[in-house]
Image (cartoon, grey):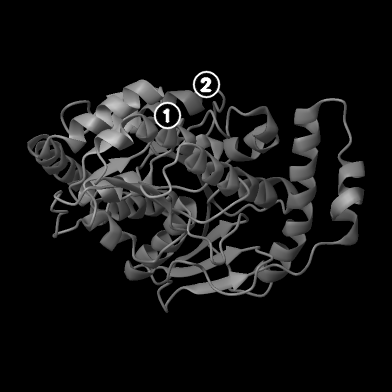
Amino acid sequence: MHTSYHICLLNIWKVINSPGGSEKVFCEMANALATKGYKVTAICCDAEKGAPFFELDSRVRFINAFNGVPLLSRGIIKNLRSLNIDKFKRKENRRIIDCQWKAKSIQSVLSNIDPIDLFICTQSESTYILKNILKCDTPVITMCHNNPEVFIKNPQFSFCNEAINSCEALQVLMPEYVDEARSVLDKVPIIYIPNSAPQIQESASLHEKRIINVSRFDEQKRIDLLVEAFALIASDFPDWTVHHWGSYSPQTKQIMNLIQGKKLQNQFFLNGSTTRISEEFRRSSIFAIPSAYEGFCLALAEAMATGLPPVGCTDCSSVNSLIRNKSNGLLVEPTPEKYAEALAKLMSDFDLRKKLGTQSKVDMEAFAPDKIWDQWDKLIKNILRN
């Protein structure tokens, strides 16, 4: 037991009522560390009131540090303060302004809680706040929830790299991400620890004529590719349906219009978010993940752990590692024609669905939660002992 160690998880992105992957990891990590005997405080800075979408253990102290946005950090004034000829610099300036006002809210919280032995930052801006603004000398681990190309190597986030380089560790989600991150960050130890996959006893029967896709509405997720692909084969499989689960966003209307334009209203459904996604996986027979890039997709991991055969794209980071083509799923080029061909192959062949789904389930055993949280426990203890 490690009751003498106080661990603080810091997340300055949206947490309240938000069902995304990084939010899920934030809550699951807090719960797992509390179970291992650490004293855990989970801090966010979210304008919305309420609780996290994912349940927190009663032993975790959850604090929303949000205390209002200062006038000089809002709207037109914020945009004026961010002015620059370079559009990337403008975006960077806006992010720095957000970090500055959030830092004040976080500082007031930290001054009123017990001393912290280790911070785990769930994004690079959290690390920037601690290291560059608050000048914190407490050990910090930074998590990279996506491909390093998206954040660490992105010019819009380069202002955070000096802070990350001074951390005790940077965690990445796939082995290949170690070298990618190292090409930019030459001082911080870079550690590969993947996300965990639930170990699910009951598998999907794979008899239901349902394809499932779980994602937010975002260009990254390429939901339009799935719609375009399914439209090519929908008339050949009139009993099959596609069910998308994920919270609505401004892009939802665009996808709705595409579905209507392809006359798929009776076969392609946008269902919103749910707290019962495990049930939806068990009711499905194929998991579609047409994403352009991922860090380590939790929905893919849970789908595979439920015994669903996935269809992914060859150009998608991490997906093209977790899915081994024709072994535990299918990988195809990101075109409607190729994606439709892969879906049709699985839709018309139960034995193939069963074969690939069975292997998917076996492969997810390597990511069992106990194994992953033991790796985190070992990393934390090594840092605190040294």
Q: Position of residue 219 (x, y in %)?
A: 55, 36
**Residue 60 or residue 232, whichever sits in front:** 232
Residue 232 in view in this figure: yes
Q: Residue at x 66, y 35 (%)?
A: 157
Q: Is residue 137 above or below residue 83?
A: below
**Residue 276 tag number:** none
Picture quadrant of residue 93: top right
| Label 1 Cα neighbours within 10 Å, binned few <14 / some 14-19 / many ≥20 | some
Q: Is residue 40 above or below residue 227?
A: below
Taking the view exactly as shown, the residue that stands out farthest to the bottom is 58
| Label 2 Cα neighbours within 10 Å, binned few <14 / some 14-19 / many ≥20 | few
Q: Earlier in the sequence, mark 1 or mark 2?
A: 1
Q: Position of residue 161 (x, y in %)?
A: 63, 34
Q: Residue at x 53, y 61 (%)?
A: 18
Q: Residue at x 46, y 73 (%)?
A: 60
- Classify residue 175 as left or right of residue 79: left
**Residue 37 or residue 277, whichever sits in front:** 277
Q: Amino acid at mark 1?
A: Val
Q: Under tag 2, what secondary structure? A: loop
Q: Under tag 1, what secondary structure? A: helix
Q: Is residue 137 above or below residue 222?
A: below
Q: Amino acid at mark 2?
A: Ser
Q: Position of residue 80 (x, y in %)?
A: 92, 42
Q: Which quadrant: the N terminus?
A: bottom left
Question: Mark 1 = which residue?
Answer: 178
Q: Residue at x 43, y 37 (%)?
A: 227
**Residue 158 or residue 111, whichever sits in front:** 158
- Classify residue 261 as left or right of residue 307: right
Q: Is residue 5 above or below residue 12?
A: below
Question: Mark 2 = which residue?
Answer: 183
